[in-house]
Structure formats: C-alpha cells, structure tokens
C-alpha cells in the first residue's frame, strides 16, 4: 500500500512537471527577427521586407515575429552592419556595395557597365558562381540568404550627361564602395561618400551635383525634383543581399531555419520578378512630373561609356577574380 502511494506521488509529480513544461513551451516568447533597411516601404526592397513578414507570420503565427524598420528608422547606412554583427538586428538587405571589406569578390556587382541588362544579372545570380558568393562571409558572422534586385542604376545631375567627358569635375554622391569611388575618379569626377538618407539634402544644397540610383529610388526619394537631368545609363546594379546574423541563424531549430529559407526563396523570386516593372512604373511617374529630362544614350554613346570604364575592371581584377568577372560577362549571352 505504501509502495502504491509512493508511486502515485511520483506519477503525480511527473504529470505536474509535464504540464508545467508544456505550459512554459506555450508561454515561450516567439523568435523575433528585426529586419532593418534604409529605403521606403514603396520600393522593391521595402515591399520584399513586408512580404517576408507577412508570409513568415502566416506560417509561424506563434513562433516567429518579424519587425520591419524602413527608412533608416532603426539604423542608418553607417550603423546597420555593426548592429547586425552585435545581433541588435537579425536581418538586413544592404546594397551589395556594402560588402567589399567583408568579401572583396562581391565588388563584382559594382563594376560599371558589366551587365547588359537586368536579365543578365539574374542569370548570373542563379548560376553556381553567383550562389557561391552568398556564403563568402560566414566566417565574419554574416550569412547570405538571397539577392533582391532593384534594377539597374541611372546617372543624374544638373548637367546633361551624354558622354563620359560630361561628368568631368562634377561631385557625385556614392555609397561607401571602393569600386564606385574608382568609377567616378575614372571619369575625372569627384566622388563624395554620403548616406542614403542624406542624399536628397546633399543634392538640394549643392554639396553634391549628381548621383546614381535606379528609378524607384529616384522617385521615392524625390531625387528628380532636385536634378535637372537623368541619363538612362543602366551602368551599374543596385542589388541587395538579404543577410542574417550567422550565430542567430545557426541557433534556430533546423526545421524552422529550413522553413524560413523556403519563404525567403519565394520572396526573392517575387521581388526580382516585380522590381523591373516597379522601376518602369516609377520612371513613368518621373516623366509625368516633368521636373527633369531623361536622356537616352545611343548604342554608340553607351559603348563609349563602357570603354571608358574598363580600366576600373582591371584595377579590381585581382581582388574579385578574373574567372568571376568572365562568368559575369558570360551571363550577357543567352
């Protein structure tokens, strides 16, 4: 009888512990992913972040919460990478120009006039060479999950830019990128490193005379209101790599990590499918605003720009890798 009573107490205690553990499991806080970025919600990146939040919270309503912070509302250009490495944010989608000090190979995407069109960019990103670049920074604490393209960049200035010589002496806002710095120096122009959030004021006050942006950023940041001319140069890529803090990512349960990866792949496909259409729509809004003139280059004029920029390719060939540059060039051929 005593044994039965003792066994009952043990079973009751075990049951109580089980109920407590179960209650604690249900009461556990969800995984929080802070997703910070520097552009408006209306841009391809902004829409991608919101779509990722929507799909993740639909699939994991009690397990994962995604907090999106647009327009540098949490961290600006100069602080977001440090915040990720400290795990103060878990996810970013910085411009590929931001990664030169972490993985010099990624400077490939900044080489001017390397890609003929956005379709060539996408072919390269889906190639083995393109995918390999996502895993080049894990030893630095950064894991790449995918590419989000914001289309090709256009030059803007308060002077008509038709030929490379027209850029001489102008001050251009650039991101913190050695390649982009060299790009404008090759044109005998003056690069000025400036955060994205400061660009409009810099152009408005004349601190800089020109910039390079895809149409979606030109429109969303009202750059067309403070620049007289936009040259449709399609000279460079503004693309983002969606990244996570490696320690945070590797610490997630494998099944959750796999599920989030699948969602990211889905969102990346959607962003890249829609971004070109998005930019074309914003281009039309710029035309309708009639605040600046769009200059279209002839094939001969574009060829002159490309030849003028080839020395930049050569300058960075050793740090990027000649084979990688050749693989990117090959993507221009269908």
Image (cartoon, rainbow, N blue to C red):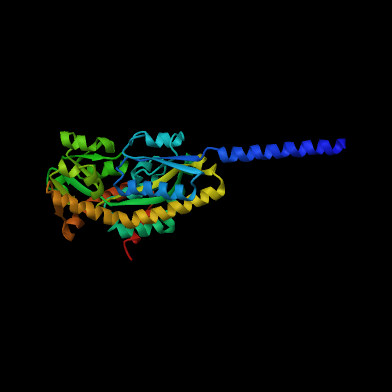
Can residue 326 be seen here? The reply is: no
Residue at coordinates 61% horizontally, 39% vertically from top-left?
23
Residue at coordinates 79% horizontally, 38% vertically from top-left?
8
Q: Position of residue 278 (x, y in %)?
A: 27, 53
In the rendered image, the quadrant that contains the C terminus is bottom left
Question: In the rendered view, would you say 27 is above or below 320?
Answer: above
Quarter of the rendering containing residue 202? top left
Q: Is residue 198 left or right of residue 36?
A: left
Quarter of the rendering containing residue 192? top left
- Nearest the eye: 176 or 311: 176
Q: Residue furthest bottom?
A: 334
Question: In the rendered view, would you say 202 is above or below 323?
Answer: above
Can residue 211 be seen here? The reply is: yes
Q: Position of residue 84 (x, y in %)?
A: 43, 37
In the rendered image, the quadrant that contains the N terminus is top right
Q: Is residue 59 left or right of residue 162?
A: right
Quarter of the rendering containing residue 198? top left
Q: Position of residue 133 (x, y in %)?
A: 43, 50
- Nearest the eye: 262 or 235: 262
Residue at coordinates 14% horizontally, 51% vertically from top-left?
288
Q: Residue furthest front?
A: 1
Question: In the rendered view, would you say 92 is above or below 127?
Answer: above
- Nearest the eye: 166 or 319: 166
How many marks the image carries: the answer is 0
Q: Position of residue 69 (x, y in %)?
A: 36, 39
Q: Is residue 88 left or right of residue 19?
A: left
């Amino acid at each position: 009888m005593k044994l039965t009573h003792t066994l009952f107490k043990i079973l009751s205690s075990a049951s109580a512990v089980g109920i407590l553990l179960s209650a604690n499991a249900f009461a556990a806080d969800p995984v929080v992913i802070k997703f910070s970025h520097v552009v408006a919600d209306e841009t391809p990146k902004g829409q991608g972040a919101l779509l990722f939040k929507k799909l993740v919270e639909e699939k994991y309503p009690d397990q994962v919460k995604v907090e999106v912070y647009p327009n540098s509302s949490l961290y600006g250009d100069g602080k977001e990478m440090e915040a990720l490495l400290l795990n103060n944010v878990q996810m970013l989608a910085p411009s590929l120009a931001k990664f030169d000090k972490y993985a010099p190979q990624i400077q490939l995407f900044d080489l001017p006039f390397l890609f003929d069109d956005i379709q060539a960019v996408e072919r390269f990103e889906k190639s083995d060479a393109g995918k390999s670049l996502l895993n080049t920074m894990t030893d630095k604490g950064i894991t790449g999950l995918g590419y989000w393209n914001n289309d090709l960049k256009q030059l803007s200035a308060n002077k008509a830019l038709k030929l490379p010589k027209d850029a001489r002496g102008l001050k251009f806002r650039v991101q913190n990128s050695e390649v982009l710095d060299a790009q404008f120096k090759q044109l005998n122009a003056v690069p000025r490193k400036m955060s994205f959030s400061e660009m409009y004021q810099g152009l408005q006050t004349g601190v800089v005379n020109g910039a390079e942006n895809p149409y979606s950023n030109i429109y969303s940041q009202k750059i067309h209101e403070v620049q007289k001319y936009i040259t449709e140069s399609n000279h460079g890529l503004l693309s983002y790599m969606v990244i996570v803090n490696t320690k945070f990512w590797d610490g997630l349960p494998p099944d959750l990590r796999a599920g989030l990866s699948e969602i990211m792949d889905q969102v990346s496909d959607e962003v890249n499918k829609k971004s070109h259409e998005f930019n074309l729509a914003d281009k039309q809004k710029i035309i309708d605003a009639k605040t600046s003139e769009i200059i279209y280059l002839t094939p001969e004029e574009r060829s002159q720009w490309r030849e003028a920029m080839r020395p930049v390719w050569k300058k960075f060939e050793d740090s990027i890798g000649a084979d990688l540059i050749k693989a990117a060039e090959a993507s221009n051929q269908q």
